[in-house]
Amino acid sequence: MHTALYVRVSTEEQSINGYSIGEQRDRLEAYAKAMDLKNIKHYSDPGFSGSNLNRPAMNDLIGDIEAGKVSHVIIWKLDRLSRSQRDTLYFVQDVLNKYSVKFMSLNENLDTSTPMGIAMIGIMSAFAELERSQIKERMAMGREARAKAGYYHGGGNHKPLGYDYVDGKLIVNPYEAQIVREMYDLYVDGNSINSTAQIIWDKYPDRIKSKTIVRDALKNNLYIGKIRFNGNEYDGLHEPIIEQKTYYKAIELRKGRSSKKYGSNKRKGLIVGKAYCSHCGARIAREVSGVNKYRYVWYTCYSRKASAPPYMKRSDNCPSKRWKEEVLNNLVISKLKELDFESFELESVESNTAETVYIEELSKLDKQRNRLIDLYMMESIDTAMLDKRMQDTEAAKQAIQDKINNLKSSPLPIDELKQLSSFDWDSAPIEEQIKMMDALVERVEVSNKSVDVFYRF
């Protein structure tokens, strides 16, 4: 039989602050030699939280005890076993005592061979668990108090686009703020979320690393001077970037576009309301002239129409040409026919997989938070460091939750995509064509030489 020396640290920071694996092992080994204990075996769990007993070396130790290989277990401090009273008492009573293994803790000078020793372990474990719960409660209250006072609860590593994080406060970053204003202008001006994200992503690759950043920014009330925390909204101390009327218009547009009932209007043009001029950015109007067999339908940029109101025009010298409706419609329909539904089915599966990954990331962040509390309780980090890292963790959790919400709020139009491959554009009634077009297409950008289609998904 051998003497088991068990050591654990929560994270690498503990090593930096003098509570290292090596130091624990040296002290335990010296104690074992002083007690004339032979056949020493080390069990080490570096980087594991004390929130439960499910750790590699701890599992090995329990297995060796149950196999009758261990006579003594020595630890540096009781909380090396676990910060859960239930787990600690289980280990002492149902493992150590059951197999007649003697237990020693250097810091507490405990002896489990007596009833008083068992009682002391129970009392100390209860206080350790209570302290851990109280720290969690105080930290939550502290973060909520900061939010109520108007402070952003993120950190420098998770600063929002448009701001810098300086001395605990958000300061407007002029360059990034302009990007935010531009994305709001694009969206309010008629672009879909996807086309807005694509435009911003292409234009500012140095700041926009994914389209999700744009999608999330278009619903973030931080940009009108608010702080959101735990489902509540508070007035922030930071300077707003977006005017409230612009922000709320974007919110209303988003709600309207997501709940819109397609195909209920009486319009005749297939892409009316969706067509924009690539040259000047103005809308493109549908014009009808003549009667019966001499009837002609054209699409013309508003900037080229003499009768158009001034606010609809974007340029006095737009070079765009007129398009025949039949030609333009056929070009757009040909783009739809090129869509591969199988790829969208795959994307839908990938979306579900992404949500599972995000949920796992949230679980990991919860574990990181527990480890931070462990570090604080062992005085390995101070209050300021704990507060900063907890803020960073909460900001990361909020960012992941936003991604999950975005996945749920942007479903694919599965029914329309399934019908697309067999849809008869030549014989289907115009109402059915419009319904299909509205479900799939957000915007059509037309130049003299090409047509670009931006989808709703």
Image (cartoon, rainbow, N blue to C red):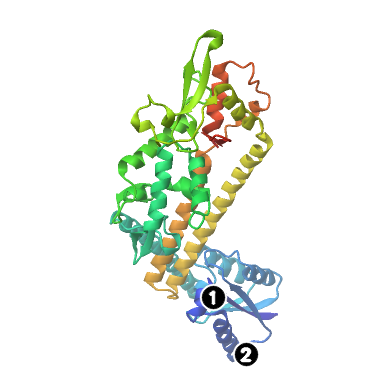
Give percent across and percent down for residue 206: 50, 58
Instruction: Relative to 187, say whether 44 is above or below.
Output: below
Is residue 408 at least partly visible in the picture? yes
Residue at the image point whose x is 45% and y is 65% from the top: 129
Location of mark 2 (residue): 36
Instruction: Choose between 457 and 383: the one closer to the eye.
Output: 457
Instruction: Relative to 53, say whether 333 is above or below.
Output: above
Disc 2 crowd rating (10 Å Cα; few below 14, some 14-19, many 20+) is few
Left or right: where 16 falls relative to 94: left
Give percent across and percent down for residue 60: 67, 70
Comes first in the chain, label 2 or label 1 = 2
Mark nearer the viewer, 2 or 1: 2
Instruction: Choose between 225 and 66: the one closer to the eye.
Output: 225
Q: What element carries label 2?
A: loop
The amino acid at mark 2 is: Asp
Q: Residue 377 carries which label?
A: none
Q: Distance between the residues labelled 2 and 1?
A: 19 Å
Location of mark 1 (residue): 112
Instruction: Relative to 39, say whether 402 is above or below.
Output: above
Q: Is mark 1 on a helix, strand or loop?
A: loop
Give percent across and percent down for residue 127: 42, 68
Residue at the image point whose x is 45% and y is 52% from the top: 398
Instruction: Choose between 222 and 2: the one closer to the eye.
Output: 222
Give percent across and percent down for residue 426: 64, 18
Quadrant in the rendering for residue 283? top left
Residue at the image point whose x is 46% and y is 38% from the top: 191
Is residue 415 at least partly visible in the picture? no
Image quarter (top left, top right, bottom left or bottom right) of the N terminus: bottom right
Image quarter (top left, top right, bottom left or bottom right) of the C terminus: top right
